Amino acid sequence: MVALVAQLLVVVVLHFQGGSHGAAASPAVSFQTLNVREMTAGMKTRPSAVLGHRKFSKAHNHDPKKWLKLVHRDSIFTGNFSGHRHQLEERIKRDVNRAAGLTRRLTRARASGYHLSGFGSDVLSGMSEGSGEYFVRIGVGSPPKDQYMVIDSGSDIVWVQCQPCSQCYQQADPVFDPANSASFAGVSCQSSICGRLENAGCHAGRCRYEVSYSDGSYTKGTLALETLTFGDTAVHNVAIGCGHKNHGLFVGAAGLLGLGGGSMSFIGQLGGQMGGAFSYCLMSRGTESNGSLVFGRDAVPVGATWVPLLRNPQAPSFYYVGLAGLGVGAARVPVPEDMFRLTELGEGGVVMDTGTAVTRFPNPAYQAFRDSFMEGTVGLPRAPAVSIFDTCYDLSGFEIVQVPTVSFYFSGGPVLTIPARNFLIPVDEVGTYCFAFAPSSSGLSIIGNIQQEGIQISFDAANGFVGFGPNTC
């Protein structure tokens, strides 16, 4: 029976419906199965030790793509294991800060006409609030020194901590020393790259950068060109920040790999080399599967369901999508499409973000969505609210339950029905499960990484599309 349920969940992940421009079709199924026993058992598993982590990134020979494995931060340090409930509470604290920071960032952008344009921008990444969720393993320098880097789809920055370090936080690996790299090259104050920095400085003829975050975290140091290595593939002359003075809740990672839509992100710097394309698959919690991050046109899969990307000139780093509505079971939730619209002034809209865990919708939309789900789960025993989750259930006496399907209706017709494990999640080891959505305090909606887990997500920035599926992880 467990195997049968596992197969069902895979089918649900891949369930999409296309549609002509206009009203979207309803999902073909109204209920799906959640394997409570399997998911609860997964929460009791200790994080895997990072033995041999220096072999973490390994690509196939002669593979033109840039390929990386992804690992969740909770699996990196076994010494910090303190139970799933505590980990969840800490994750939610980070997440609340992240979501609030994104809202503040967009509010400032609209008020000041501020544009994100590189290392000197007032960028709020997942790292800044300690909310970097997914790490990759990258070689920095020549010869390459492996480092953990947080991926952030909402940031246009690549940086690592560097020696000599006047102030550095603790990280998993030795701090990178540019003196031992044959490819490290400082950027002069007169260079065009330095001229693009909003907060650029100059010291001894070298360009200095400084990035400050809204929680008081920061990184300061030297702007440089350096080689980054992904398995067997080296990418030369990547503009990075070499941070000599860094402060914040960065939790073990050496720095950040910005994957945002701006020209100074890693994707932007690759430009035509990779065709503006990358794909990731975030591993599901409580499973032994691996996530992946792939760069290049070969990362664009055949058979994906494609949704147009929307551009917000006030926040070019973010990947916006057009969301027309929400569905529970076989019915569409009565929420007007304008609730999710990105206005000409850059207000509202729906952002896909790897650094935010929990998906959020404006409060009226969330309430209608939640109420529809509760109507479909009247037979399940309720449990008290947990943190930001106000709809929870006591499933301790169940092995398998049926719950209503949850669907996103995208503009133009496509419907994405997400697996049950992506919206009804365990919050402890004893069988308490919560509806993993939350209200937004503003008009901004965020599709977070919990709802993205296990689904291949591909960005074709050059052509302005994001794809879902067809593969899983």
Image (cartoon, helix red, strand yellow):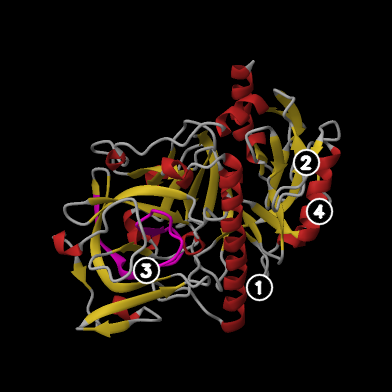
- 458 horizontally vs 367: left or right: left
Residue bearing mark 3: 246
Residue 30 x, y percent position in the rendering:
77, 32
Q: Which image quarter: residue 232?
A: top left
Residue 304 x, y percent position in the rendering:
53, 40
The mark nearer the N terminus, 4 or 3, is 3
Q: How far apart are marks 2 and 3 (CA)?
A: 45 Å
Crowd around label 2: few <14 · some 14–19 · many ≥20 (10 Å) = many
Residue bearing mark 4: 367
Q: Is residue 307 visible?
A: yes
Residue type, label 3 = Asn
Q: Does the magenta stretch include residue 209?
A: no
Residue bearing mark 1: 344
Q: Are marks 2 and 3 in contact (CB under 8 Å)?
A: no
- 372 horizontally vs 231: left or right: right
The mark nearer the N terminus, 1 or 2, is 2
Q: Is residue 220 above or below residue 277?
A: below
Q: Distance between the residues labelled 1 and 2?
A: 30 Å
Q: In this view, does 11 lie above or below 426?
A: above
Residue 98 x, y percent position in the rendering:
57, 61
Name the residue located 69 percent from the left edge and 32 percent from the top edge. 431
Q: Is residue 247 magenta?
A: yes
Q: What stretch is highlighted in magenta?
A: 234-263
| Residue 328: image tag | 2
Q: Which of 158 and 77 is in front in this view?
A: 77
The mark nearer the N terminus, 2 or 4, is 2
Secondary structure found at label 1? loop
- 45 horizontally vs 264: left or right: right
Crowd around label 1: few <14 · some 14–19 · many ≥20 (10 Å) = few
